[in-house]
Every structure is written in structure tokens, then in C-alpha cells.
Image: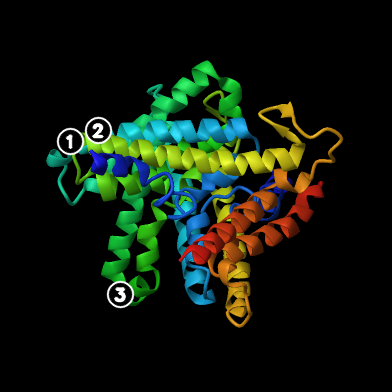
Amino acid sequence: MNIAQFLTIFISSVFIYNVILSRFLGLCPFLAISKESKPALAMSLAVTFVIVMSSMITWVIYRFLLVPFNITYLRTIFFILVIATFVQLVEMVIRKISPAMYRFFGIYLALITTNCAVLGVAVMNIDMFFVKNKAVAGSFYFSLFQGFSVGVGFTLAMLLMSGIRERLEFCDVPESLRNFPIAFIIASIMSLAFMGFNGFRF
Amino acid sequence: MKNLFNEFLKGIIKENPTFVLLLGLCPTLAVSVSMINGLSMGLAATFVILGSNLIISSIKRSIPDKIRIPCFIVVIATFVTIIELVMKAYSPALNRALGIYVPLIVVNCIVLGRAEAFASKQRVFNSLLDGLGMGIGFTLALVLISGIRESLGSGRLLGITIFKGFEPVLIFSMPSGALLIIGLLLGFFSLIKGKRS
């Protein structure tokens, strides 16, 4: 476990295999909530928080529950239930503690359960940091950090997209391309730009 | 009878999950590099929709309203696990090609959407027809996108060379090409719709 490994995880999750632009996880919020910057930022922060926490929880469950009892084939069911419960819990806690924050984040939190990025990262962590059902050295920290990096990548893509779409409001887009088609075409060009990071080597 | 036929047909064109409802885009874009991947993904999702619609519409009376979403998710996740294990056992290469997108069928909005909007309210037979229609609509959309991407991106279709002496446009095999194709297809469909009305 050294700094270089963490750096590799960060660069590859944020730029090379960006969660939205190259892995296509979390496209629904990317298209639906990217019309303005402020809600886009709120959504991204909520998603980052949930991804980090759920990477932690799913790692613990996999390592200390599924592996010892030899029921790793149940991981999909376990993970999705845990994530759904966790999101509900966070929503309840936020509503109780801070109504202002609930107004800012609340509606997006409910949507996160079905955000494929969250489950996708959990599954990816298990695939990458467990070899034959044994945790590799530092696997817990790698999982946490990968969760965080994917969240950063998500935030970056959301902010770029919402910035572009805010300006797009004043453009004369052909009628049949308005709204979603043009958003996809912009995302395609952004993805093309992110492909430039593909040659990165350490 | 006509009513039943409509339940089946609506998923294919009028309420096509990919092009009209814009649901389940993540797997659509990610696995459509080759037609065989697209077709397999479509069939796997069809199996999950059919199974979950069947079970949910048969047990809808015993599901408490407040915790219905977790109940739906458990049913869906069970079917996804079944298809994942079957795929791992009989076609490991395909399982590797589809990768994490197989377990991600769980969070495919089409499946949960049909459970919530249709299967939890309708009779079993209607739900089966609805699931079949939606599944076929999703599969057709995947076949269309992956067909375009594979033929332009590698000059082949289902692994068979169709264009001789054609320099493949590599970009269509990349993520960026997937986004471009679906953007243009959506624009094309809304152009047709605008012309007709």
C-alpha cells in the first residue's frame, strides 16, 4: 500500500474511466438534474457521500458476513438492500436534524437508491480488491478511496455538463434536437475529450 | 382480446423504454459495443422483467404498501442473481464481456418502473404481457444501437464482416460513439414525430 496506488485509483476513477462519461453509470441524474449548476452540485455531493459510505458498508458486509458463511453469490441482493436502507436512514436523519439541508438534498437522496453508480462502485470494489474471496492488503482503504474518487469524477462531469447546459439555454438548437438529444451529443463530445487521458502512464 | 394485445404492443413502439421513456440507459450504452452483447443483455433484462412482473403481480395483495419498494427490489434481485449464476455457468465469456452490468440490472429503472407502475396493480396475465412487450422493446432498441455501433465501429455484424475494404470508424466502438449514436437517434425519432403531427 503506497501513495502511487492511491494516485492510480484517483486518476483512473476521475479521468480515465470517468463514472459517467466512460462507464455510463448514473446517467439518469446526469441528464435530469444538469440543467442548472446549483442542484447539480447538491446532487453530486449527496451522491459522493452515499457512494463513500456504501463502499464502506458493503465492504464490511462482504468481508465479515458473506465470505465467512460462503454465500457470496447473494451479494447483489445484500448490497442493494443495504444501500436502500442506508439511503432511507440518511434521509430520515437529515430531515430530523436540519430541515434546511433537507430542502437542499432531500429530494435527490430518494433518487440515489436507484443510481447505478452506487451499486456499481460496490460491485467494482469487490471485483477489484478481493482475489478468490480474500481481501488484498489495504483493500478496505482502496475501496473507500475508490468510492471517494468516483464521487469526485461524478461531481466533475455534473458541473461541466450543467455549466454547458446553462449556456445552451441561449443557443438556437434545431427543434428536434432540443433537450435530451443535444445533451447526449454534448456528453459525447465531453467523453471524447476525456478519452485523451487514456494514454496516461505512471 | 384487443386490449391484451395492446398491453403487449405498447412497450415495443409507443412506450419504448429506451427511446420514449429514456429508462435503463446505462446498460444500453455500455454493452452495445457488439450486437451479440446487446442481444444477450436485452434477453437477460427481458427474463428479469418477466419474472419480477409475474411474482409481484401474484403477491401484490400481501405486500404492505409502505415497504413495497424494498419488497420489489428483493424479488428483482433474486431474478438477477439467477440470471447471473446461469450466465457464469454456461457462458463465462459472455459474463466477462457484460461485466458489472449484469448485477446492475437490479437498478435498471425499467424493471422497477414496470413493477411499480403496472405489475403491482394489474392481473398476472396482463403483467406478463406487459413485461414481455417492454422486454422486447428494450431488446430491439439494444439491437438497433449495437448494430449501428458494431457495423460502423468494426465493419462487422455478429462477428461476420459485412463491409469489405472498409476502414472502421473506431470512435463508434468507444463510449463517446455510444452517446453520439443515441443522441442522433433520439433527434431522428423526434423529427419523425414532429413531421407526423
- Furthest toward the front, the residue is B196
Taking A96 as reference, is B157 above or below it?
above
Determine which residue is flagged by label 1.
B59
Taking B65 as reference, is A92 above or below it?
below
How far apart are labels 3 and 2 at the CA level?
A: 39 Å
Indicate the quadrant containing the N terminus of chain B: top left, top right, bottom left or bottom right. top left
What amino acid type is highlighted by mark number 3? Pro
Q: Secondary structure at mark 1?
A: loop
How far apart are labels 2 and 1 at the CA level?
A: 6 Å
Q: Position of residue A25 (x, y in %)?
A: 54, 50
Q: Which mark's residue is nearer the viewer, 3 or 1?
A: 1
Give whichever of B108, B127 is nearer the camera: B127
Determine which residue is flagged by label 3.
A99
Give whichever of B173, A114 is nearer the camera: B173
Residue pictured at 46% horizontal, 27% vertical: B84
Residue pictured at 47% horizontal, 48% vertical: B24
